[in-house]
Image (cartoon, helix red, strand yellow):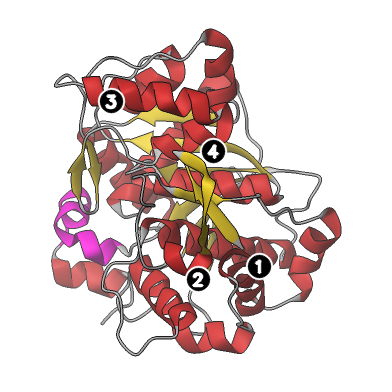
Amino acid sequence: MLYITTRNKHDVYTAYRTLNEDRGADGGFFVPFQMPRVDRDAICALKDKSFGQNVADILNLLFSARMDGWDVDFCIGRYPTRLVAMSHRILFAETWHNPDLDFVRIVRNLTNRIRGLDHTLEQPTNWAWIGVRVAVLFGLFGELAKINSVDPDHPVDMAVPSGDFSLPMAVWYAREMGLPIGNIICGCNDNGGLWDFLHHGELHTDSRAVHTATPEGDVAVPSNLERLIYGTLGSRETERFLEAMDSGRDYRPLPTMLDSLRRGMYAGVVSDDRMEQIIRSVYHTSAYIMDPYSALAYCGLQDYRTRYAENRTAIVLSERSPIRFAPTVCKSLGISGEDLKDRLNLT
């Protein structure tokens, strides 16, 4: 499979390049030269294959890899994910069941397996993060189909933390490829940047720009918004966005363009206090422990459902174990670190 970038559709790059560099020579993000599509029959067939094989099929498509289900199982284990059904047609999809209790291990191991090199990358590239997430989403949908939780004719909503916007973009690409995904619901920290952009069509790029918390630290304008603008509005509008970024001006797409940007995309703003409250509340009502980023996504889903009176099946993606955020989770629940390990069955 070949790639171009968000800033130049003429120079072509190999899939291998996307696994070794974050951006092209022009500074743009790598995007598929032609978005692959998975037809309805193939979506229906996901339930007939193992999780590992479904992941391998998409990795082979995106990265010209030569993997099978056994390769995936060897890299990340046979049961790296877990689906937890909650009330009100909500499922948590945990993708952190590995010795590191962190999805980054899955991305790192699969990326290095595809690269086929002796030395490993400590930090996977931007497209590696997105591509592996897309593959895992196909694996998850295969598992969901096996328990009759999804089918091609009834899309499900997906709730995710916004972060640097790479996770929402992975869900966006998976939807573009054919997975039956309805709305992509983004939970944001206590700031209004992404919310203002999607709901009011205004993005501050200067010193007024809000900072979005990610596992790697605070970032200003989420970098992968460039991908969304390119994917929905095209190269010329991406140039306008980049010009605004370079000059520190506000970026405002035309109203018609804004409709395209936010179609099937929703953002909710969640305060730290509310995040802690929801961790505590869900545990007391369902005995389920959320990490802070899953709590952001869950709150965003609540806001979306309240606003639009929508209650179709929704998946909340969870990429890190609550133990990775023990101080925040323990504070929310009023328990010690050892108690948290006990309740997560990690002792």
- Disc 3 vs disc 2: which is toward the camera? 3
- Disc 2 vs disc 4: which is toward the camera? 4
The image quarter in which residue 274 lies: top left
On-image quarter of the N terminus: bottom right
Residue bearing mark 2: 81
On whether residue 145 falls in the magenta region, the answer is no
Q: Position of residue 257 (x, y in %)?
A: 55, 17
Can residue 292 be seen?
yes
Depicted 89 relative to depicted 287: above or below: above
Secondary structure at badge 3 equals helix
Which segment did they paint magenta? Answer: 322-335
Residue type at mark 4: give it.
Ile
Residue type at mark 1: give it.
Glu
On-image quarter of the C terminus: bottom left
Q: Position of residue 31 (x, y in %)?
A: 52, 49
Secondary structure at badge 2 equals loop
Residue at (20, 33) in percent of width and height: 211
Q: How many marks?
A: 4
> From mark 1 to mark 2, how far is it between C-alphas?
10 Å
Residue bearing mark 4: 184
Comes first in the chain, label 1 or label 3: 1
Q: Are marks 1 and 2 in contact (CB under 8 Å)?
A: yes
Q: Which mark is residue 245?
A: 3
- Disc 1 vs disc 3: which is toward the camera? 3
Residue bearing mark 1: 143
Q: Are marks 2 and 4 in contact (CB under 8 Å)?
A: no
> From mark 1 to mark 3, how far is it between C-alphas?
41 Å
- Disc 3 vs disc 4: which is toward the camera? 3
